[in-house]
Amino acid sequence: MDTIECIKTRRSVRKYLDRGISRETLNQILDAVRYAPSWKNTQAVRYSLVSDREKINAISDAVLGFTYNTKTIQRAQILAVQSVVKGISGYEQDGSFSTDKGSGWQMYDAGISAQTFCLAAHSFGVGTVIMGVVDDVKIHEILDLPDDEMVTSVIAMGYPVENKPAPKRREVEEIARFL
């Protein structure tokens, strides 16, 4: 699949077949994610891939009352819990901010990485959806993540039940200015 086709055909997928994702496919997705750009090549984004049903159920209880996400998580074959190592992206070595975005730059890097993750997954036929309405602290505890990491999103994964067409998109003239 070429890049433009991958971008234009990738969808947020919330319903998955009861079919596992091989370790080989997961490794190929993660291998591609390593190439996502990051602040000064800090590569501060991390992924915890969760297939254990008890942990998945515990995470589904940590979606802050958003039942749509609860159902999606419970249907997923794998959850990719994305986190960032705090205090690296957007910072100088002395701990000061390199940008007026402050600590927000790590979320920019997380977003780039998440999109790269989802596009790579799509290229292998794996559907994904990025979820941000989650209890980051509770998920951090469930997975016993290192103290220097912060959960940024949860990406549900699985082979799609169906392939839906793209929703209507704004025209180029509505999203861009040529100055």
Image: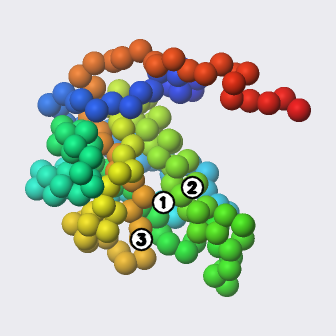
Query: Tag 2 or tag 3, which sits nearer the N-term?
Result: 2
Give the farthest residue toward the right.
179
Q: Residue at x 51, y 17 (%)?
A: 168
Q: Quadrant of the C terminus?
A: top right
Density class for disc 1 (Cα within 10 Å; few <14, some 14-19, many ≥20) is many
Mark pair 2, 1: CA separation: 7 Å
Give the farthest residue toward the top.
165
In this rendered view, identify the residue nearer to me: 9 or 104: 104
Task: Give the residue at mark 3.
Answer: 149
* Image location of residue 75, percent across then percent down: 18, 37
Task: Give the residue at mark 2.
Answer: 109
Q: Is residue 61 left or right of residue 121?
A: left
Asked if marks 3 and 2 touch (Cβ < 8 Å), the reply is no
Give the farthest residue toward the left.
54
Q: Residue at x 58, y 54 (%)?
A: 108
In which image quadrant can residue 73 be found? top left
Asked if marks 2 and 1 touch (Cβ < 8 Å), the reply is yes
* Image location of residue 53, percent across then percent down: 12, 51
Q: Amino acid at mark 3?
A: Glu
In which image quadrant can residue 64 be found? bottom left
Q: Tell me: residue 168, above or below residue 137.
A: above
Asked if marks 3 and 1 touch (Cβ < 8 Å), the reply is no
Mark pair 3, 1: CA separation: 9 Å
Density class for disc 2 (Cα within 10 Å; few <14, some 14-19, many ≥20) is many
Mark pair 3, 2: CA separation: 14 Å
In the structure shown, which secondary structural element does the residue marked by tag 2 occupy? helix
Q: Amino acid at mark 1?
A: Val
* Image location of residue 145, percent across then percent down: 31, 70
Q: Amino acid at mark 2?
A: Asp
Task: Give the residue at mark 1.
Answer: 45
Query: Tag 1 or tag 2, which sits nearer the N-term?
Result: 1
Query: Tag 1 or tag 3, which sits nearer the N-term?
Result: 1
